[in-house]
Structure formats: structure tokens, C-alpha cells
Amino acid sequence: MKKKLIVDIIMFILMLLEFSRFFTGALLHELMGIALLILVIVHLILNKNYLLNILKAKYNVKSIIMLITNILLIISF
């Protein structure tokens, strides 16, 4: 659980820094983008049980909203 939280926090910080290309420069922007991509893959691997159980789950309103939010985040990435 702690690994997941650390990966998520680092991803969040990198994502915020990615929006500031003017301050970081092109090279650092590219390197942070690669690091972010690697962290997204690690995040998906750490949360593989969630992905495998999406179709098996029983959904209430909160679960449906969270699923829609996750799908929209995936599309936006």
C-alpha cells in the first residue's frame, strides 16, 4: 500500500511539473515525461487486481462515479 501511495504522489508531482515546460526547459520536460510514463506502467502493474476485477464487481453509485472518473482519466492521458 505504501508503494502505491509513493508512486501516486511522485506521478502527481511530475504531472504538475510537466505543465511548466517554460520553467523546466525542453530536455527536462522530455525526461520527466519518460519518467511519468514509466511510473504509469508501474502504477498499472501495482493495481492489476483492480483492473482484473472491473467486470466482476457489483457497482453502487459511488463505484460507478469512480469508474467513470478512472475511464476519463485514462482517455485524457
Image (tube, rainbow, N blue to C red):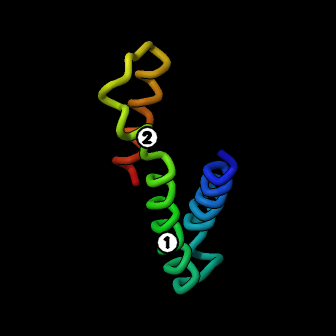
Query: With respect to residue 18, does 67 lie above or below?
Result: above
Residue occupying image coordinates x 44% and y 61%: 41
Q: Using the rendered view, name the quadrant where residue 73 is placed.
A: top left
Left or right: residue 52 versus residue 8 is: left
Residue occupying image coordinates x 53% and y 80%: 31
Numbered disc total: 2
Identify the residue at the far left of this view: 55
Q: Mark 1 = which residue?
A: 33
Q: Residues within 10 Å of mark 1 (few under 14, many from 20)?
A: some
Judging from the image, what secondary structure is the residue with disc 1 in? helix
* Percent x, y of residue 7: 61, 57
Q: Using the rendered view, name the quadrant where residue 32 is placed.
A: bottom right
Q: Nearer the viewer, residue 28 or 47?
A: 47
* Percent x, y of residue 77: 40, 54
Q: Mark 2 = which residue?
A: 49
Query: With respect to residue 54, does 3 lie above or below?
Result: below
Q: Residues within 10 Å of mark 2 (few under 14, many from 20)?
A: few
Judging from the image, what secondary structure is the residue with disc 2 in? helix
Residue occupying image coordinates x 44% and y 52%: 44
**3D distance between C-alphas at marks 1 and 2:** 26 Å
Residue occupying image coordinates x 37% and y 32%: 53
